[in-house]
Image (tube, rainbow, N blue to C red):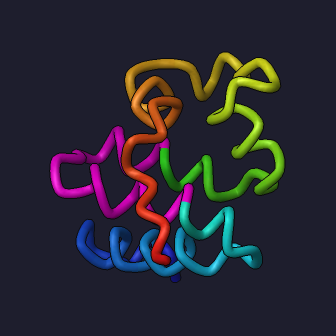
Amino acid sequence: MAELLTFEGRKQRARFRAWHRGTREADYMIGGFFDRYHADWGAEELAWFEALLEEDDVDVMAWALKTQPTPPRFEGALMAKMQELDYVDIPR
């Protein structure tokens, strides 16, 4: 079924998955990253993000916070942007 989705459909699914991680902290980090950067993504960037969504939240957050080394398959420009953390908007 996933292979039947259009590119925009894949983005919509990724947005939902990014904002429904299970913890508020992961939602803000992963969902906020998606909201900030997805508009400029092509197929390669979306595929990277979809693979990232398959990982455990604690691992993704540790890579973004640089408390654990990032696996080689996730290193690169997108992870560098994620590690800046300037996209996290925490409502008060």
Position of 82 with respect to 42 (left or right) is: right
> What's the residue at 56%, 20% (across, down)?
75
**Main SS class of the magenta portion in the image:** helix
Stretch of the chain drawn in magenta = 29-48
Give residue 5's position: percent from left, percent from top: 36, 77
Give residue 39's position: percent from left, percent from top: 18, 57
> What's the residue at 77%, 37% (across, down)?
62
Residue 30 higher or lower than 27, as above or below: above
Position of 75 with respect to 10 (left or right) is: right
Residue 83 higher or lower than 61, as above or below: above
Residue 19 higher or lower than 30, as above or below: below
> What's the residue at 26%, 66% (across, down)?
7
> What's the residue at 81%, 24% (across, down)?
68
Give residue 49's position: percent from left, percent from top: 49, 49
Does residue 54 belong to the magenta stretch?
no
- Name the outermost residue toward the left: 40
